[in-house]
Amino acid sequence: MSEVLVIKAHPKTADVANSIEIGDRFLKAYQAIHPNDTILVHDLYAEGVPEINSTNLDSWKKLTNGVTYNELSENEQILLSRQQKLQDQFIAADKYVFISPMYNLFLPNRLKMYLDLVVVSTKTWVEGEHGPEGTLKNKKAIHIQSSGGTYHHTDNAFMATLDMGDAYLKALLGQVGVKDYQGIYCEGNSHRDPEDMAKNREIIAQEAEKVAKSF
Ligand SMILES: Cc1cc2nc3c(=O)[nH]c(=O)nc-3n(C[C@H](O)[C@H](O)[C@H](O)COP(=O)(O)O)c2cc1C
């Protein structure tokens, strides 16, 4: 039995967002094959993500300097316990499903905010002899991304280099030990009429359902 953590990072819902609809199809297919797995969904736009601000930074410093959790202010405790919970869930997961649109060649900011909270020194990576060493082993990740342009389904290799959000997510997860990573890309949406977009979405959703069976 595996724990699957789904990170939805789209301000919209499935009825209007290609990536969310494909993500839902992926999860449905996954569940059908793995009915006993636990699936935890974080909808970052519906739930919000605590930002790293001076309160967080101060409270982390206090804890490092020997102040106990109970000695922190109520505000600091609330922020820390939310962060702790997100970190614990991230570390406990066996599989990650990231669902997001591309924004300015990168990830939506709430996804970056989430990653800043859960990827932390001493927990998800440690300083090794030859640099950072990931502590998360035998886990896998998939990134379902939708974009206006076409970066992966093209012979133009330069386009793939522009998809810095996907490359960053792969690199960051690799640094914490999650080396098994794949992307599913629903692309070219800016140039498609509604009929063509629906057709392409269906092709990518079927690809996602296929991948779900071996994920
Ligand atoms: C703020 C913003 C920035 C965007 N930046 C890019 C971009 O850099 N490259 C791109 O191909 N599409 C970009 N898009 C388009 C979206 O990625 C595209 O509409 C995508 O299909 C949205 O995801 P969805 O289909 O799941 O709703 C941007 C859209 C918004 C709202």
Image (cartoon, rainbow, N blue to C red):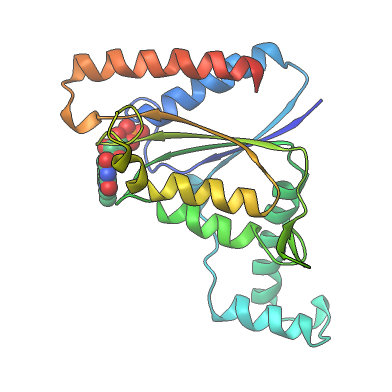
Determine if residue 104 is in view: yes
The x, y position of residue 28, in whole percent, is 57, 17
Q: Using the image, determine if residue 194 lies above or below residue 49.
A: above
Viewer-proximal residue among 188 and 129: 129
Residue farthest bottom in this picture? 65
The residue lying at 65 percent from left, 17 percent from top is: 214
Q: Is residue 86 left or right of residue 51?
A: right
The residue lying at 63 percent from left, 18 percent from top is: 30
Q: Using the image, determine if residue 54 lies above or below residue 135.
A: below
| Image-quadrant location for residue 73 | bottom right
The residue lying at 59 percent from left, 19 percent from top is: 212
Determine if residue 45 is in view: no
The residue lying at 25 percent from left, 36 percent from top is: 148
Q: Is residue 215 left or right of residue 15?
A: right
The x, y position of residue 149, in whole percent, is 25, 36
Viewer-proximal residue among 143 and 18: 143
Viewer-proximal residue among 199 and 170: 170
Quadrant position of the N terminus in the picture: top right
The x, y position of residue 18, in whole percent, is 36, 27
The x, y position of residue 106, in whole percent, is 38, 51
| Image-quadrant location for residue 115 | bottom right
Q: Is residue 105 left or right of residue 43?
A: left
Viewer-proximal residue among 20 and 189: 189
Q: Using the image, determine if residue 67 lies above or below residue 148.
A: below
Q: Is residue 103 left or right of residue 67?
A: left
Dividing the image into four quarters, tell me where ligand 1 lies.
top left
